[in-house]
Image: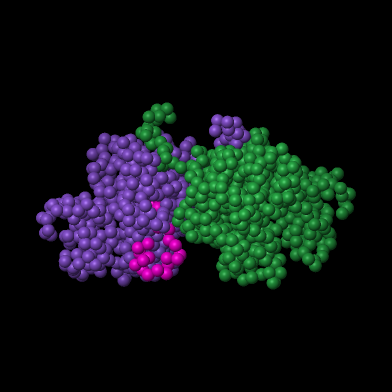
Chain colours: A purple, B green
Amino acid sequence: MSAKADSPYLQGLDRNDANYVPLSPPSLMRRAARIYPDYPSVIHGDLRFTWAESYARCRRLASALSKRGIGLNDTVSVISSNIPAMFEAHFGVPMAGAVLNTINTRLDAVAIGFILDHAEAKFLLVSADFLELARQALTLASVKPPLVVIDEEGADPASEYERFLAEGDPDFDWQLPADEWQAIALSYTSGTTGNPKGVVTHHRGAYLNALCNALDWQMGLHPRYLWTLPMFHCNGWCFPWTMAATAGVNICLRKVSAMGIYDAIADHGANHLCAAPTVLTFIIHAKPDEVRPALQPVKVMTAGAAPPAAVIAAMTERGFLIEHVYGLTEVYGPAAVCAWKEEWDDLPLPERARLKARQGVPYTVEEDLQVLDPLTMRPVPWDGETMGEIMFRGNLVMKGYFKNHKASEESFAGGWFHSGDLGVMHPDGYIQLKDRSKDIIISGGENISSVEVEEILYRHPAILEAAVVAKPDDTWGETPCAFVTLREGASVSEQEVIAFCREHLAKFKCPRSVIFSALPKTSTGKIQKFELRKRAMTLLPGTV
Amino acid sequence: MSAKADSPYLQGLDRNDANYVPLSPPSLMRRAARIYPDYPSVIHGDLRFTWAESYARCRRLASALSKRGIGLNDTVSVISSNIPAMFEAHFGVPMAGAVLNTINTRLDAVAIGFILDHAEAKFLLVSADFLELARQALTLASVKPPLVVIDEEGADPASEYERFLAEGDPDFDWQLPADEWQAIALSYTSGTTGNPKGVVTHHRGAYLNALCNALDWQMGLHPRYLWTLPMFHCNGWCFPWTMAATAGVNICLRKVSAMGIYDAIADHGANHLCAAPTVLTFIIHAKPDEVRPALQPVKVMTAGAAPPAAVIAAMTERGFLIEHVYGLTEVYGPAAVCAWKEEWDDLPLPERARLKARQGVPYTVEEDLQVLDPLTMRPVPWDGETMGEIMFRGNLVMKGYFKNHKASEESFAGGWFHSGDLGVMHPDGYIQLKDRSKDIIISGGENISSVEVEEILYRHPAILEAAVVAKPDDTWGETPCAFVTLREGASVSEQEVIAFCREHLAKFKCPRSVIFSALPKTSTGKIQKFELRKRAMTLLPGTV
């Protein structure tokens, strides 16, 4: 190699201002505003913005923040519903060089206070509906960032946020980051136990994922995107930036409900939305008078749990096309997709559901996704059977955890990001999630995937939701314990549920106990299995 | 800033093997082979490859090159028609760490000899149809690279290229470049005068342009791409890499002819192709027995000259959808696109043609495209009138010219890539090319855009092709001189042509002379204006 140090390819061919630009999401908005200034960018109730207007507002925001001394690597926290200002923060904050910290509005004041302190928040934007919560959090927090209240209804010029924007320059000469590795966002994971961890992402990854969402979901130009997914969740999985890349329309939704969704589809032509499985349930169980016909097919990206066959069938029947993606906050939201193959279209529903339930393959710009043995770091056999840990590698992986070097090092051990999820690799190169490491049930030395048992429970016509956890057992170590909620008007006995499982599962995998109960959930809608485990521990052996 | 050097965002959040990967096109092929191993990658006559096969062949090629000592920053030259091996070279060569130098097969042996020497070619792949040319070039060149002949017809295992691949390992553990700024290709511009310049591009830009072609052209998954564009031209505008990103099909074409194109559309479902204006002329003027009905719409990306209204109308009528792009070898081929707006669909044809004739706006991943005054480097007014130089900035700009530091510096002066093309900026932010700097005609102190005059000439029903150049004039300095070829069977007089121009142009812009003649063209199909200028100089003043 040393002999090649004088290669002519290494002479006079360096980076310069003409041929190298850091990848940064605000560039995408500048372009949308130049080419499509009059195209709609945001719909919120009666409020409308164009791309020229949104860009001017984001420049004002960046300018106003700069005037208050906010700049490089300062944290700007936002506690807000999915309103235009929340969208604007995704551009205005990075244009000021600062780091966007969107906070889950379902957290309590204690958790939010912790986050504000840990994030070292220098500035705080709060939508009026969460002002009380924010004030409580601030009384608990050590940091005392200036707070600007956003009028959640619209753009009343008398409101604090609008007056703040008015301080800023709509022609503000914002700068690209000096390095695309610069932090763009800080997002705290919901954390089922202990304090949440702060995931730091960078401009490069956010830009690449913005493009990749559009490419891998084949969104086309000017998609009409309905905001059912909270923007505080992983920066709305990078979709604020995707909407700039595609010059689409952000359709805000005041309340995520079946009626709100069907109205947005009918009135605003919404044709894309992202949703946790709970939202799919809303759509499917809409009352007849809430349902309105759509003139366009609606694409639904879902993550968080594999869509069961019944959900796929019901959604398809209603004109929705489901895309199943997988990811974590640490990989910018979805970084894997169950890439669908045409030849699967004609398979019977159960088979299609089985294929669609897989978490799939890496996004186009994610370099790799494998199931590795975390001890040896070698791939498990591609047999669809052998479990290992799901790991990612590539440009859609966080910089690391904020002020938590130990956690960062652990998560990057061996040069891969360790998801903490257990899965298998199928012979066709598609991964399938089997469980969170801590959710696996070990019974008589055999691993039982709680997800596998849940999949069977979901097939039972009486069952609406199901979660399976380990229950301590003197003989077996652990046995599966199922918690289920029933559909309205349905009824079934514990023995009937167990018998149903036996038809589809090896005996040792079947629940020994079935508890009929509402399921506790986290602020992002995930079932809190640690709560269920606590309850399962208090059950007498062999009793319900 | 110095006070912020201890920002927690700068602590323990560095790049590592898990979260940073150089952007590199071969990654896209690895992914296509994993997810779609059995999907077709290449069709060439009766030959078929799948993505798994293509990937294995490219790994073999990289491995075989490595075994011959080819590695980092070694130039591998290729003189080949659009056959599977040419596609494979776009992956196998960079997988070996080497630089791909595809050579224009229409050049003569002297020019090719010059290129082989200037590029310091270390290895040479030649398709059998150009073997004689390559041998002549090698007798003239100082370098004597090992030469492997490719059987242009298929994959005969006895052929040199197939035997060479057999030396390589199909499981070769190729490495990503250490730096995405590493050179991936060296492409010589056709150069209308003097020796050609070698444009060096990098992995990062090639990867980003590969994605952007798919995104901006909305190609979808598994496009069926017909190779009407030579791959030696700017790496086929990066489409070999785009096809890996989209897991599409490369449909090779033995001979670019109307019949070949219509056959590929009917027999292989081709739905995308890139073509110089000449190829559009082939399609339009196909004989009735060459035309075959298409079951699918066919998207045509054209560059090199604005498609005239008549061409747009004729192509649309035949079921082709024209996308007009603009670029140069220095910006990886197209880096600007005339982004079409729905609201233009219903305009009358002349208006649509006027809008479509513009070179447009930057590609999504190209940072900026402006018309600047090259002296002051300030933007010209967005008035559609004031001429300036078209300039690019962003990640789709070359590293520089190979071994030509002076030319690189000139082309990057002021932090922008100077295209050498003159144009205007319209009020809506779309640029329009008016002329090459050297093609502008200065008459009585007024600038005349030769392109503007040509646009008018193309509207004349008798005229098939037209080119306008400056003719020296004692009174005016220069006057416009038109060279035209007529449609088969058409006839028109010089005075009729001039009168037609007067109807549409200011008098000083109208040609003083019209010469009926075939037009000399470069090896890439561009009209050689310097030849026409020579001819115009020999004309007596005021005579034809």
- Residue A535, image x, y percentages: 16, 53
Residue at image position (25%, 60%) is A453
State the quadrant of the N terminus of chain B.
top left
- Residue A235, image x, y percentages: 38, 48
Q: Nearer the viewer, residue A54 or B235?
A: B235
Left or right side of B327 for A195: left
Which range is magenta? Answer: A326-355
Q: Nearer the viewer, residue A127 or A521?
A: A521
**Residue A353 part of the magenta segment:** yes
Residue at image position (84%, 47%) is B537
Q: Nearer the viewer, residue B321 or B342?
A: B321
Residue A404 higher or lower than B526, as above or below: above
**Residue B407 part of the magenta segment:** no
Left or right side of B215 for A125: left
Residue at image position (48%, 51%) is B30
Residue A17 higher or lower than B81, as above or below: above
Q: Nearer the viewer, residue A475 or A189?
A: A475
Q: Residue furthest front?
A: B158
Residue B28 shows in this picture: no
Residue A14 higher or lower than B517, as above or below: above
Residue B465 shows in this picture: yes
Residue at image position (11%, 56%) is A541
- Residue B162, image x, y percentages: 60, 52
